[in-house]
Amino acid sequence: MIVGYTTGVYDLFHIGHLNLLRNAKKYCDKLIVGVSTDELVQYKGKSPVIPLNERLEIVKAIKYVDEVCIQDDLDKTKAWEKLHYDILFVGDDWKGNEQWNKYEKFLNEKGAKVIYLPYTKTTSSTLLTKALEEIVDHKTE
């Protein structure tokens, strides 16, 4: 059985999230998805709009997802030590990143690999958040 793993905040769930999960499932028998805690997301300089427990339920309901876990550490090597996945999926916007090159090397030594999936450029949580902020700002004027 091939086990795949991917992570994300999955705030304001959108087509980019669905595309990643759908594409990842094509490569594995079991897809485990880590959902980032609110505290972990602080590195982005913001807090999720949707609470963690709701984000977990949303991701768990997606038909491509076999298991959901909480991601409370960005280190994918620690996740491998815990889950022993065969494939780590991430958007291709991370390809060539120094940290991801290190993950590739670590996983190759363990007999696992990273697969970079197409990043959906037309939609992102950041774009959705900005649009919502503009609507709120406009209503308060």
Image: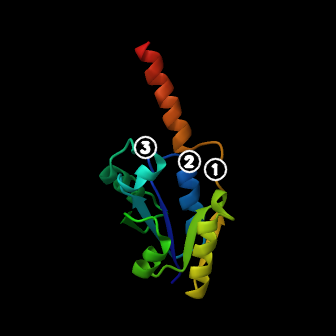
Separation of disc 3 and disc 2 at Cα?
A: 21 Å
Q: Which residue is mark 1?
A: 120
Density class for disc 3 (Cα within 10 Å; few <14, some 14-19, many ≥20) is few
Going 52% across and 46% down the picture, which residue do you hit?
A: 14
Are the residues flagged by discs 1 and 3 in contact, CB closer than 8 Å?
A: no
* Tag 2 secondary structure: helix
What separation in Å lies between label 1 and label 3 (alpha carbons)?
21 Å
Comparing 34 with 109, the one in front is: 109
Residue 24 rendering spot, x and y as whole percentages = 57, 66
Residue, far top: 141
Comes first in the chain, label 3 or label 2: 2
> Crowding at label 1, few (<14), some or many (≥20) Cα neighbours within 10 Å?
some
- Name the residue at the right extreme: 96
Which element carries disc 3, helix, strand or loop? Answer: loop
* Residue located 33% across and 52% down the image: 52
Q: Name the kind of residue labelled 2 in the image.
A: Ile
User: Which amino acid does the dot numbered 3 rest on?
Assistant: Lys
Mark 2 / mark 1, whichever is N-terminal:
2
- Left or right of 17, for residue 68: left
Residue drawn at point x = 47 percent, y = 69 percent: 75
From the viewer's perspective, tell me whether residue 135 is left or right of residue 56: right
The mark nearer the N terminus, 1 or 3, is 3
Of tags 3 and 2, the one toward the viewer is 3
Q: Are marks 3 and 2 in contact (CB under 8 Å)?
A: no
Tag of residue 15 = 2
Measured as percent of width and height from the top left, residue 94 is found at 63, 60
* Residue type at tag 1: Thr
Q: CA distance from mark 2 to mark 1?
A: 8 Å
Question: Which residue is the site of mark 3?
Answer: 46
Dot 2 and dot 1 residues touching (CB under 8 Å) = yes
